[in-house]
Amino acid sequence: MDSASWAAWLTDPATRSFSFQSPRGRYTARKEYRSRGGQYWVAYRKLSGKLHKTYLGKVENITLERLEDVAVALTGHGAEATARPPPVDPTAVDGQAKERSHQGPHGDPLLLTKLSIPFVRLSLIARPGLSKRLEEGLERKFTLLSAPAGFGKTTLLSAWVGELSDDGRPIAWLSLDPGDNDPTRFWRYFVTAIERLQPGFGDTALALLDSPEAPPIEVILTTLLNTLADLPADTVLVLDDYHLIKTRVIHEALTFFIDHLSPRMHLIVSTRADPPLPLPSLRARGESNELRFSQEEAATFLNEVMGLELTAEEIAELEGRTEGWIAGLQMAALAMRGNADVAGFIAAFTGSNRHVVDYCSDPASLSA
């Protein structure tokens, strides 16, 4: 605290929030932005069902003394809070949620890098069309971004949500891994990500997840959804690498969450294969936004990334045959390498192509 490394940590783009607790009080601090004036920090705490906020200041103002003063201001108990720490009740919803928010099932710590937006890397393919589609998709509740490994899904999303965050829109990110197939762990990370959208909104859900006899997940999510109905601004939550989730009960609970999602929240799922979510019904209701390669992006991929030399007519025909399916384009490109009769190959390329059949008949390919 009050050191050069402390200031550097606060300034780091990956640092978006932190929890503060002392004998004088506790709260969550969140980095926010203004188009003029740059970044600053705001403290949030929920008391008696109402969310309170206090301006902390810019990085140079975030001293231990300033943090303590704001803790007193947000306790609502004045001198009593200064004299001794608030009582600790292990069953209290509001009293313990913040302390548990960085712990996983059975007290295991949560890995905060999973909740950070990845740094933007140089993309192999410029995708203004996809960025525009992502922007347009904010009018719906759900966006699906599906493509095989190495096609820049995370790069595209991290660059795009970075622009949204700079404009002041609250953004939360969760990078999934195989360990998140444990339902309790998955939902703890999920709710903690939502805490970054609006501090205090996940308190009750986190406490219920931790209770000795936790209620059904639909009950917990109902509590969370009712709270999200009071979001003060439009928000975005990204679930990256969702193809790693194989647990049926998680898919079912996420379906329940999407079906009842607040209009103030937009959920983006990035995956290597379409997830077992109710995509047809979401399409039918006009509530989903699904992205695929455009002809221009297909041309860049096939000629620049895969090293082919296709004409515009050949690219258009192949893009039409695959309907922009990125995995199909990849398999076609691999099969065309060294093929002297490119035109004949494209004309004959169908779902019965050996590479397509091998891909679709191998269950491992859907999780690769």
Image (cartoon, rainbow, N blue to C red):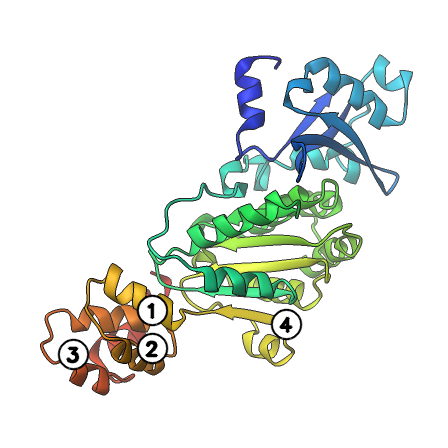
Q: Mark 4 to mark 1: distance in Å? A: 26 Å
121 on left or right of 24:
left
Comes first in the chain, label 1 or label 2: 1
Query: Tag 2: residue type?
Result: Glu
Q: Mark 1 to mark 2: distance in Å? A: 7 Å
Comes first in the chain, label 1 or label 3: 1
**Residue at left 70%, top 34%?**
98
| Residue beneath disc 4 | 287
Can you give x and y, in whole percent of width and height, for residue 90 in the image?
74, 33
Query: Tag 1: residue type?
Result: Ala
217 on left or right of 118:
right
Query: Tag 4: residue type?
Result: Glu
Question: Which quadrant of the figure has residue 321?
Answer: bottom left
Residue 350 vertical position relative to residue 361 in the rendered view, above or below = below
Closest to the camera, between mark 2 and mark 4, is: 2
The numbered dot on residue 298 is 1
Picture mark count: 4
User: Mark 2: which secondary structure?
Assistant: helix
Comes first in the chain, label 3 or label 4: 4
The numbered dot on residue 342 is 3
Query: Tag 3: residue type?
Result: Val
Q: Are marks 1 and 2 in contact (CB under 8 Å)?
A: yes
Comes first in the chain, label 4 or label 1: 4
Q: Are marks 4 and 1 in contact (CB under 8 Å)?
A: no
Residue neighbourhood size for the residue with mark 3, other residues' Cα within 10 Å, grouped as few (<14), some (14–19), many (≥20): some
Nearer to me, 8 or 198: 8
Closest to the camera, between mark 4 and mark 1, is: 1
Is residue 246 visible in the rendered structure shown here?
no
The numbered dot on residue 180 is none
